[in-house]
Amino acid sequence: MVKEGKVTSLQGKDVSIQADTICIHGDGEHALDFAKYIRKALKEANITVTKLGDFLKYGSFSF
């Protein structure tokens, strides 16, 4: 989604998207571990990870 700019629909078709943010929902037992794993994977892929407030303040990743 973030790297390729697309997701696959339930029908199996690719749908183009621009993913500027991700939102993780969950209060399950492993929610925090899941969020940490996602953050680590994004950073390892050289994808900028920043606080939502900074993203909103600057309007993009141009800061």
Image: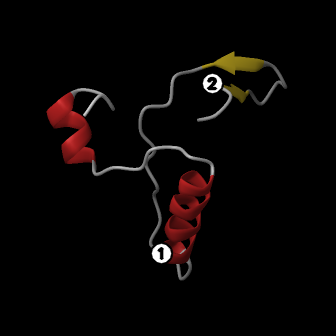
> Extreme bottom residue here?
29
Classify 20 as above or below 29: above
**35 and 55: which is toward the camera:** 55
**Which residue appears at 82% of the width and 24% of the height?**
11
Q: Position of residue 26 (x, y in %)?
A: 47, 65
Identify the image's colour scheme: rainbow, by chain, secondary structure or one colour.
secondary structure
Quadrant in which residue 4 is drawn: top right
**Which residue appears at 15% of the width and 35% of the height?**
57
Residue 12 numbered tag:
none
Q: Position of residue 37 (x, y in %)?
A: 59, 67
Name the secondary structure under disc 1. Answer: helix
> Extreme right residue here?
12
Quadrant in which residue 60 is drawn: top left
Q: Mark 2 points at which residue?
A: 5
**10 and 19: which is toward the camera:** 19
Do tag 1 and tag 2 residues touch (Cβ < 8 Å)? no
Foreground disc of the pair 1, 2: 2
Q: In this view, does 63 lie to the left or right of 25?
A: left
**34 and 45: which is toward the camera:** 45
Q: Where is residue 22 in the image (x, y as percent from the top left)?
A: 46, 44
Amino acid type indicated by mark 2:
Gly
Classify 23 as above or below 18: below
Q: Where is residue 9 in the image (x, y as percent from the top left)?
A: 74, 27
Q: How crowded is mark 1: few (under 14 residues within 10 Å), some or many (20 or more)?
A: few
Q: Mark 1 points at which residue?
A: 32
Amino acid type indicated by mark 1:
Leu
Q: How crowded is mark 2: few (under 14 residues within 10 Å), some or many (20 or more)?
A: few
From mark 1 to mark 2, how far is it between C-alphas? 26 Å
**Which residue appears at 75% of the width and 29% of the height?**
8
Q: Which of marks 1 and 2 is nearer the N terminus?
A: 2
Which quadrant, please, contains the N terminus?
top right
